[in-house]
Image: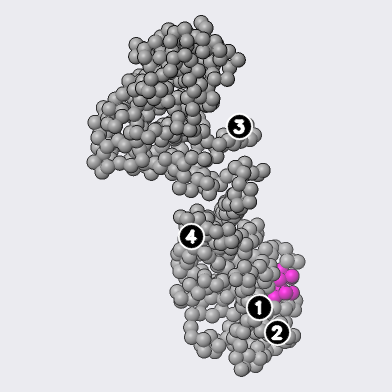
Amino acid sequence: MLGTAASSAATIPTTARSSEAVRRAFHGNTLNSVSYSPSYHSIVCGRFHFVSLRSFAAVSTKAMPHSQADASSDLDLQSSASGNKQALISLSDKKDLTLLGNGLQELGYTIVSTGGTASALENAGVSVTKVEQLTCFPEMLDGRVKTLHPNIHGGILARRDQKNHMEALNKHGIGTFDVVVVNLYPFYDKVTSTGGIGFHDGIENIDIGGPAMIRAAAKNHKDVLVVVDSQDYHALLEFLKGGQDDQQFRRKLAWKAFEHVASYDSAVSEWLWKQTAGDKFPPNLTVPLSMKSSLRYGENPHQKAAFYVDKSLSEVNAGGIATAVQHHGKEMSYNNYLDADAAWNCVSEFRNPTCVIVKHTNPCGVASRVDILEAYRLAVKADPALAREIREFRSPTDGETRMFYEIVVAPKYTEEGLEILCGKSKTLRILEAKKNEKGKLSLRQVGGGWLAQDSDDLTPEDIQFNVVSEKKPQDGELRDAEFAWLCAKHVKSNAIVIAKDNCMLGMGSGQPNRRESLRIALRKAGDEAKGAALASDAFFPFAWKDAVEEACESGIRVIAEPGGSIRDGDAVDCCNKYGVSLLFTNVRHFRH
């Protein structure tokens, strides 16, 4: 089918015979003008008329000596209106580029490429048309402007089923692109690299042309296949070989392209906000999540679930369960992740070797000892009936445990310790995690929105335990109070923890009445509550004939609480009556 007269552009090497080469190449067409760019001495651009409905196919050169490229220019120009399928490739990460280039070339595609990508393809023996040969304009501004040109974006965005679109392409001599393969400057890797990156270097690593091409191709995915991930090269080539028109395949690639750009932009936005304002709570917040795994089900079998890793810049190398390495065992479940996270967050607070036992995200057993095996045995004592789900250690290396458990999390393992643990059960999940960094942003979902707050990073070293009673605690009693307070921080409110000698003896959690939480903790501690320390996550609203007096009557020797109640005086008087030390921390530790 013949189209209307069209105008296009071509480039040839500048030689003594350049003008004659143009005339011979376009013999029979009308040469309008020849323009010369003094800033780019290797390009001569010609405007000419030709008759074709299919787009202009630009000069294609294979890796060859310069003289051979000159000799082949005339033949290449004569095929400029042949209507070859075109693929645009511009990659920062050139993994499997040769595979892609060869595969497309074997399928008859003319490959258009930019800068380093074009050079890599030529070095691999793949024929390449450089972008400037289509645009008749050199790369400029230190690479900031290469593909931002109508000859590129027109060829990507034109709808093949719209007559006026195709007529516009023919009028201006613009070729269509059937495949666009682009990935972006490594901004994420640069700004998170060891030592960081300067502001101006960060700005220069923000990709502009790449996202523009990706978005354009993804928008026009009905006609253009867009690929942003090297793992999709094989599927792309197989799709093209099959000659099929699977719109679902195209839509999936388009979705992945938009997601790729959105994640990239979120990293730029996060970084730039920190460079500009420094406030932890920006007016708008985007959290990029990447699926790590599909889960068998959620909290309950009837709920579908998946696990995502937070790809925010602030989470890079920041530790936590999400980035833990699983050495052994059955796949993690939804509840496994919740419990493992609770155990790991708690145990990471302690400086000495510590064992934490968790059930339904509550630490029900905690002990610190130089001997980790002894810490394990003492942790079990706090609630042996519940200590059958998770055994979480700072450094489990002995393999002498006897009770059933589902998950072990530790910062590292000896070869012998890992071998022993793997031998205990085929299903035992063994995780190796890095301690959470301080200063993270804590997010929590509510219906229709999210709550954001600073993470609760305070430790006993960060606060003052102010004595408000007549009796001052002995050094050992103060250490017990600090240990109990640190444990209570990780127990669901209303939280009460009883501890002695760096060992949790009992805890009460999740009760609407603080007195009931106290009674649960006392029941678990039994006779060992005598002479122990008690910590509460919030103040006691009542003292006489209530929680404070019951604790004193049960033999508790020191109580740590935030204070702040209008009846604080009653709590002080009650402790003075029973000779108990009372410490106000002025720090509340609600956990809902």
N-terminal of the pair, mark 4 or mark 2, is 2
In depth, the one of 225 and 508 nearer the eye is 508
Q: Where is residue 488 in the image (x, y as percent from the top left)?
A: 46, 24
Query: Where 320 sits versus 377, above or below?
Result: below
Residue occupying image coordinates x 54% and y 89%: 71
What SS does tag 1 mark?
loop
Verify whether residue 167 appears in magenta: yes
* Residue occupying the far top of the picture: 545
> Residue 348 falls in which quadrant of the image?
top left
Kind of residue at badge 3 = Val
Residue occupying image coordinates x 34% and y 31%: 354
Residue marked by disc 3: 446
Residue marked by disc 1: 136
Q: Position of residue 397 (x, y in %)?
A: 27, 37
Residue marked by disc 4: 230
Residue marked by disc 2: 35
What SS does tag 2 mark?
strand
Q: How crowded is mark 4: few (under 14 residues within 10 Å), some or many (20 or more)?
A: many
Alpha-carbon span between mark 3 and mark 2: 63 Å
Q: How crowded is mark 1: few (under 14 residues within 10 Å), some or many (20 or more)?
A: many
What SS does tag 3 mark?
strand
In depth, the one of 234 and 273 nearer the eye is 273
